[in-house]
Image (tube, rainbow, N blue to C red):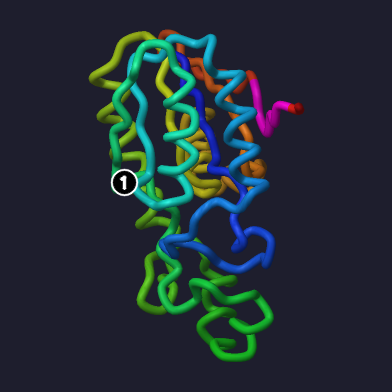
Amino acid sequence: MILYLVRHGETIGNQQKVFQGWLDLSLNDTGRKQAARLAEELAKEEFSQMYVSPLKRACETGRIIQQSLFNDLEMIEVDAIKEMNFGLWEGLHNNVIMAKYLPEYQNWLDNWQESSVPEGESAREMYQRVIGWLKEILQETEDGKLLIVTHEGVILQIISYLLGLGLDGCWHFCALPGSLAIVEVREGFSRLTKLNHRPTE
């Protein structure tokens, strides 16, 4: 099995460097161009399934890619692969969060795995929902190419889990807006073959 992990294209939230989480932002012009370039590159692949986060930025990226696929693949929306729920911090910059929620922010930094964001979730809770879904998919699908259009946090957790690094391993990677990562899974062994690939014009 080969997993094609696409991070949605750029949004104004990425430009402003705010916590997006479940904030339902659309792609900006740059993000739509990034998605179109990915679509052109992925058009030659034959995918068995296509999964997308239901948040606008992922769905818009997915639809642009879907239109380029020759086999008219259905786009399946999956709540489990939404970004981390950042609760009251969504739409806020780091500096604002530190000014308004310093004790909670410090606690989150000190115990980022288990500490829940105010009215949001913890990294552990997100990891459990993402990896719980991934395990089901891996059990149901023996081979083929899966296209997953989602968010940076989800991509990092999937890669880290498949490489046997656990939740801690997420910090070893990043996923840029509008980029592609590929993980091959063969006989229970996973290999990261592409990361942060962004096709150029």
Amino acid type of the residue that numbered disc 1 sits on in the rendered structure: Ala
Q: Provide residue 162's location: percent of width, then percent of height.
A: 48, 29
Q: Secondary structure at mark 1?
A: helix
What's the magenta region? 194-199
The secondary structure making up most of the magenta span is strand
Q: How many marks?
A: 1
The answer to whether 101 is drawn above or below residue 53 in the figure is below
Residue 14 in the magenta stretch? The answer is no
Of residues 28 and 77, the one drawn nearer to the viewer in this rendering: 28
The answer to whether 154 is drawn above or below residue 188 in the figure is below
The answer to whether 201 is drawn above or below residue 69 in the figure is below
Residue at point 51%, 49% (across, down): 153
Residue extending farthest bottom: 100
Residue at point 34%, 48% (across, down): 54
Residue at point 44%, 73% (across, down): 117
Of residues 102 and 86, the one drawn nearer to the viewer in this rendering: 86
Q: Provide residue 192's location: percent of width, then percent of height.
A: 60, 22
In the image, is 185 to the left or to the right of 77?
Answer: right
Figure quadrant of the N terminus:
top left
Figure quadrant of the C terminus:
top right
Q: Provide residue 184's location: percent of width, then percent of height.
A: 51, 16
Residue at point 64%, 49% (across, down): 29
Q: Provide residue 134's location: percent of width, then percent of height.
A: 34, 33
For label 1, the crowd category at 10 Å Cα-Cα, with few meaning under 14, some 14 to 19 and many 20 or more, is many
Of residues 135 and 68, the one drawn nearer to the viewer in this rendering: 68
Residue placed under numbered mark 1 in the picture: 80
Q: Quadrant of residue 186?
A: top left
